[in-house]
Amino acid sequence: MLALFAILLGQLVFSAPAMAQHTSLACPVQTASVQRGGSVEIDITDCDDYNFGYGFGVPLTRNGPNSGDVLVRQAFVPPSTAQSFLRYTHNGDSATSDVFEFEDLDNRWVQVRVTITAPPVSRNNHADCDAHDQSGRELFSNALVNWRNGPLHLQHFRRRTANRLVP
């Protein structure tokens, strides 16, 4: 009997942390997508059966979020409804997803799954307006130039065969 108690106690003490579990009866799992380093708002009004609202500030969470921060805000919608929003702000790390839970007003847990995407990559860091002929050869190119520390202006160039720009 003592051995069984020791085994059960060992499993309780040394078990892995629980994964996020959705237990709310008021609303389904919430999902959102955000760019790395950005923010997204999730309407969690349906997670509030009583229309009391979640108030303002940091909600009670468990299991994260690991790659961002969450805040709750609410808006009053006349005549007597409170609309609540959960704002997730990604911290800019390289994670591609984040999962956490917040407590609903029935003391149950609402799981939130956030997909984190990389921001779009620009091909060039300057204005790029090129004209091509039917064979795909570049005919004209625009570039920002600065002559003798004067103001920046758009200069139109014609491309030659040796890839030298000629005004």
Image: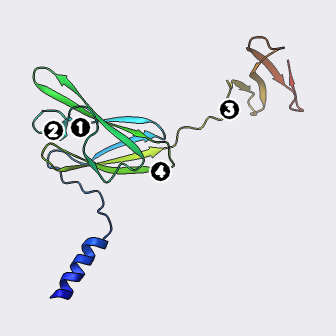
Distance, label 4 to label 1, CA atoms, is 24 Å
- For label 3, the residue is 124
Sooner in the amino-acid sequence: mark 4 or mark 1: 1
- Residue depicted at 17% across the width and 22% down the height: 77
Report if the CB atoms under discs 1 and 2 are less than 8 Å apart.
yes
Which residue does the image show at 13% across and 33% down from the upper left?
A: 52
The residue to which callout 2 is attached is 48
Residue 141, given in percent of the width and then of the height, sits at 76, 24
Amino acid bearing label 2:
Asp
Identity, as a three-letter code, of the amino acid under mark 1: Ile
The mark nearer the N terminus, 4 or 2, is 2
- Closest to the observer: 26 or 8? 8
Report how far apart the C-alphas of labels 3 and 2 lie in the structure. Answer: 47 Å
Q: Which residue is mark 1?
A: 44
Where is mark 4, residue-wise?
Answer: 95
Q: Residue at x 31, y 72 (%)?
A: 14
Q: Residue furthest top?
A: 150
SS assignment at label 1: loop
* x, y percent for residue 124: 68, 32
